[in-house]
Amino acid sequence: LDEVIGDVTVDGKPAKLGMELTPGMTIATGKASKAGLLLYRGIAVRLDENTTTTVGTLSKNTVRLSQLTGTTWSKILRIAGVEEYTLQTPFTTATVRGTAFAVKVTPEHTVIKVAEGTVAAVQDGETVPVTEEQQVEATAEEISYEEYTTDGWVEQNLGLDEQFVEEVVEEFI
């Protein structure tokens, strides 16, 4: 864990900064709380308040997370060398590489907002490409495009991504 603000738990126990995550662990944020994950020096995942995410696969080539509720932001740099980054939700699966996107899960739907790059939203074998400044809503029945909107969460994370990219570039130079 790269960031712990407020009520953050891992497998129901208080989270600690620097804690190593392994497959099967569940990270949950409470009200007015946030958590940040740094994976393989080139993937940043940020959890907003009231978010629950479980680590599936965590290897140099493949990262798979499952998001049950709440809002996350993912920034994946190609420099990380990860071949597949997948975020599973109750309504769809987002598979990406070299992109930045937000996912919000509610009991009724999942919304995917793409700020940079392309996300493949998959539901029942159907793949819907979501490109830069597009968003889709997935329900149990369908995936449909919506008008792209930004909000404080998107803007905040785009700013944090600039710092993240600078830090990664400095580390690799």
Image (cartoon, rainbow, N blue to C red):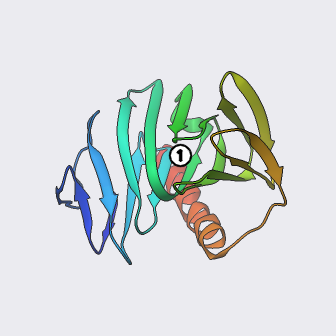
Residue 1 visible in the displayed image: no
Q: Is residue 33 visible?
A: yes
- Figure disc tally: 1
Q: Quadrant of the N terminus?
A: bottom left
Q: Quadrant of residue 13?
A: bottom left
Which residue is denoted by mark 1 in the rendering? 173
Q: Position of 130 compared to 111: left or right?
A: right
Is 44 drawn above or below residue 15 in the view shown? above
Identify the residue shown where x is 33% and y is 69%.
30
User: Residue at point 73% right, 25% down?
Assistant: 126
Binning the other alpha carbons within 10 Å of mark 1 as few (below 14), some (14 to 19) or many (20 upward) gives few
What residue appears at the point 26 percent right and 41 percent down from the top-left corner?
A: 25
In front: 156, or 122?
Answer: 122
In the current view of this chain or complex, which residue is farthest to the front? 141
Amino acid bearing label 1? Ile
When asked about the image quadrant of residue 149, the answer is bottom right
Compared across the picture, whether 71 is left or right of 159 comes to: left
Query: Nearest the camera: 170 or 7?
Result: 7
Q: Name above or below for residue 141 compared with residue 109.
A: above
The secondary element bearing badge 1 is classed as: loop
Q: Residue furthest left?
A: 13
Q: Residue at x 62, y 70 (%)?
A: 159
Residue 128 location, x and y as percent?
77, 34
**x, y (%) of residue 164?**
53, 59
Which residue is more in the foreground, 85 or 89?
A: 89
Residue 160, x across and y down, in percent: 56, 67
* Residue 104, image x, y percentages: 57, 57
